[in-house]
Image (tube, grey):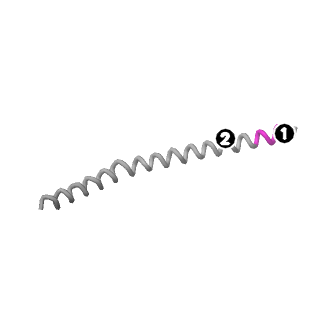
């Protein structure tokens, strides 16, 4: 009986940790990666446009 109770408590604690700590951390990492990707895309487009305009002169 004690093993079953400890198993249930361990499972509940594991789910608590996953849903309250790990998933928000992963969401923040995805947001940061998207922001870095958008900034890199804007820089790439700016460099491409400046490079083409300076080459045409």
| For residue 14, side relative to residue 48 (left or right) | left
Question: Where does residue 26 sit, x and y in percent of width and height?
Answer: 43, 49
Image-based side of 54 in relation to 24, left or right:
right
Residue drawn 70% across the image and 44% down it: 45
Callout 2 crowding tier (Cα within 10 Å): few <14, some 14–19, many ≥20 = few
Which of the labelled discs sits on residue 43, or is there none? Answer: 2
Residue 51: x %, y % from top left: 78, 39
Contact between marks 1 and 2 (CB within 8 A): the answer is no
Q: CA distance from mark 1 to mark 2?
A: 18 Å
User: Is 1 placed left or right of 26 in the picture?
Assistant: left
Q: If you read the primary sequence from the N terminus, does the residue marked by circle 1 or circle 2 appear first?
A: 2
Question: Quick one: label 1, few (<14), some, or many (20+) residues within 10 Å?
Answer: few
- Residue sticking out furthest to the left: 1
Query: Residue drawn 33% across and 50% down?
Result: 20
The quarter of the picture where the N terminus appears is bottom left
Q: How many marks?
A: 2
Span shown in magenta: 49-54
Which element type, helix, strand or loop, lies under badge 2?
helix
The numbered dot on residue 16 is none
Q: Which residue is mark 1?
A: 55
What element does badge 1 sit on? helix
Question: Is residue 33 rendered magenta in the image?
Answer: no
For the C terminus, the image quarter is top right
- Picture coordinates of residue 19, whole percent (x, y): 34, 53
Name the chief secondary structure element in magenta: helix
Which residue sits at x=35%, y=48%?
Answer: 21
- Residue drawn at 23 percent across, 55 percent down: 10
> Could you say where residue 30 lies in the image, as x and y percent from the top left?
49, 49
Against 21, is 8 above or below?
below
């Amino acid at each position: 009986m004690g093993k079953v109770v400890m198993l249930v408590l361990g499972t509940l604690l594991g789910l608590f940790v996953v849903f309250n700590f790990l998933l928000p951390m992963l969401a923040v990492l995805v947001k940061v990666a998207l922001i870095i990707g958008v900034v890199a895309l804007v820089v790439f487009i700016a460099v491409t446009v400046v490079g083409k305009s300076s080459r045409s002169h």
